[in-house]
Image (cartoon, rainbow, N blue to C red):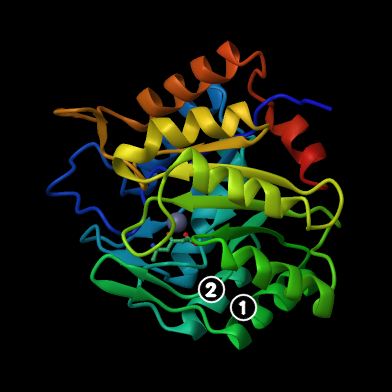
Amino acid sequence: MTTGTLITVAPTGAESAKAEVPALPVTLDELLLTAKECEALGAAVIHVHIRDDEAKPTLDPGRLRDTVAALRENTGLIVQLSTGGAVTDPEAARLAVLDARPDMASCTMGTVNFGDDVFLNRWEFIVDLHTRMQERGVVPEYEIFDLGHLTALQRLLGKYGLPAGGHVHVDFVMGVPGGMPGTTEALVACRQAVRDLPEGATFSATGIGRSTIPVMLSSLATGGHLRVGMEDTVTYAKGQPVESNMQLVARAVAAAQLAQRPPLTPTEARQLLGM
Ligand code: KMH
Ligand code: ZN
């Protein structure tokens, strides 16, 4: 059955510097304003990375708790915290993100070269994240940077069982230098592999940088959902910097409507995700 489109906004990330990208939301006030405006446009989920007072990425537990509370108070969005953090974050701090009790959290399904860095995700760490999310009732979004990460997910679910709520949702993060390319062919290969996951599994996709549009259109055409935001792209079109996260969400909404799969409300998204 074709459903509407789940739109996730990933407004900040851990990679871009505020000094180079002034439109990046880095304070709590900036994040809340972005969240409210993106929700009004059609986003249902917010994927959250936070920054410290110097606008540097942080996993500070108090700040994470305050951020979750403020997003819940000011929006109806599904709050998804990143457990990926920045490539330099230690595993213990990444696991402790779950103590902020978000609705959802990311769970990256394997190690990947990440530009000049390595985004390390050891098997034991993945198992720890998955089982702690089960215990706390946090719904995972499994982040897939390469085709083999879907095989790892099959193994994880086979050995350790379904996530909280019983629904499996994955996000293809495409076009990272070191991961799979942001092409229709790669997306179709991943989409085929989703069929080997438990029945009803859903996927979204995001393309980094110049792969943003091909990935968005390919995902919509193959029944997938969308993630957009300044975590993944800071260029709207060739030579044109992104003005705001809202500009990216508005484009995703227009594409979803063109595909006759209009955006899901947060309530509809909760149903889809088994929350
Ligand atoms: N910042 C990247 C190292 C996630 O949020 O779970 C990892 C990342 C994935 O963004
Ligand atoms: Zn992220």
Indicate left or right for 104 with 215 as reference. Answer: right
Badge number at residue 240: none
Residue 134 place in picture, x, y as percent: 78, 70
Q: Is residue 110 above or below residue 143?
A: below
Q: Which residue is mark 2?
A: 110
Q: Amino acid at mark 1?
A: Ile
Residue 165's spot in the image, x, y percent? 85, 56
The residue sitting at 37% across, 32% down in the picture is 245
Q: Position of residue 4 (x, y in %)?
A: 71, 24
Is residue 137 shown left or right of residue 184? right
Q: Left or right: 248 with respect to 98? A: left
- Residue 126 is labelled as 1
- Of residue 5 and residue 58, the one placed in the foreground of this image is 5
Image quarter (top left, top right, bottom left or bottom right) of the N terminus: top right
Labelled pair 1, 2 in contact (Cβ < 8 Å):
yes
Q: Say which residue appears at 71% left-offset and 76% top-offset.
A: 132
User: In this rendering, is residue 264 above or below 198?
Assistant: above
Q: At label 2, which amino acid type do we have? A: Gly
The mark that comes first in sequence, 1 or 2, is 2
Residue 94: x %, y % from top left: 50, 75
Q: Residue at x 36, y 67 (%)?
A: 58
Helix or strand or loop: what does disc 1 sit on? helix
In this rendering, does residue 108 appear at all? Answer: no
